[in-house]
Image (tube, rainbow, N blue to C red):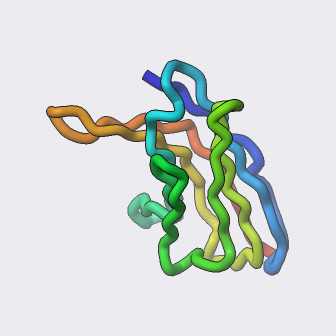
């Protein structure tokens, strides 16, 4: 199992930047694929970035070119750099770790961190 704790959310003006961090505890962090999701009020939770093993990133079209995901397996952390933020990026951001077993995908979630983009 893995436990996840996000940090780094807050209020930022449009065009600004934030860095979200996710600290993982537990075993075998490097064996998990890591992702960031977000959920705005009234919307479904959506995946916006993922980094798999080996470290291959993938992004939703809505954030491509503005957000960057990275991981440090030595420190058990995954980071999401948010640049050129827009009001529509306002949401609760969740860190996700997942792997696959014979019974299917197993997901672990952090508690979420609020990002608000507003002038």
Task: Say left or right for 85 vs 105.
Answer: right
Q: How many marks?
A: 0
Where residue 27 sits: x, y (%)?
50, 20
Relative to 94, residue 117 above or below: below
Residue furthest front in the image: 54
Q: Residue furthest left?
A: 103
Indicate the position of residue 58 as horizontal and vertical percent values: 49, 66
Q: Residue at x 59, y 75 (%)?
A: 63
The reply to whether residue 96 is in sight is yes
Residue 22 image-quadrant placement:
top right
Q: Residue at x 72, y 66 (%)?
A: 82
Question: Which part of the image, by quadrant, shows the C terminus?
Answer: bottom right
Question: Is residue 36 in sight in this rendering?
Answer: no
In the image, taking residue 26 as reference, residue 119 lies left or right, namely: right
Q: What's the residue at 68%, 76% (across, down)?
A: 66
Left or right of residue 94: residue 68: right
Q: Residue 58 versus residue 19: which sits nearer the camera?
A: 58
The x and y percentages for residue 112 are: 59, 44
Q: x, y percentage for residue 98? A: 39, 40
Between 50 and 91, the one lying in front of the other is: 50
Above or below — where is 61 with respect to 46? below
| Figure quadrant of the N terminus | top left
Residue plotted at (59% across, 53% down): 93
* Figure check: 111 above or below 119: above
Picture quadrant of residue 90: bottom right
């Amino acid at each position: 199992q893995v436990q996840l704790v996000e940090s780094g959310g807050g209020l930022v003006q449009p065009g600004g930047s934030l860095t979200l961090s996710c600290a993982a505890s537990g075993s075998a962090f490097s064996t998990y694929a890591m992702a960031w999701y977000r959920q705005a009020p009234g919307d479904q939770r959506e995946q916006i970035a993922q980094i798999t093993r080996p470290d291959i990133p993938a992004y939703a079209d809505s954030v491509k070119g503005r957000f960057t995901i990275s991981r440090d397996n030595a420190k058990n952390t995954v980071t999401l750099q948010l640049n050129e933020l827009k009001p529509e990026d306002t949401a609760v951001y969740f860190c996700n770790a997942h792997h696959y077993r014979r019974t299917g995908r197993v997901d672990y979630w952090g508690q979420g961190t609020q990002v608000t983009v507003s002038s």
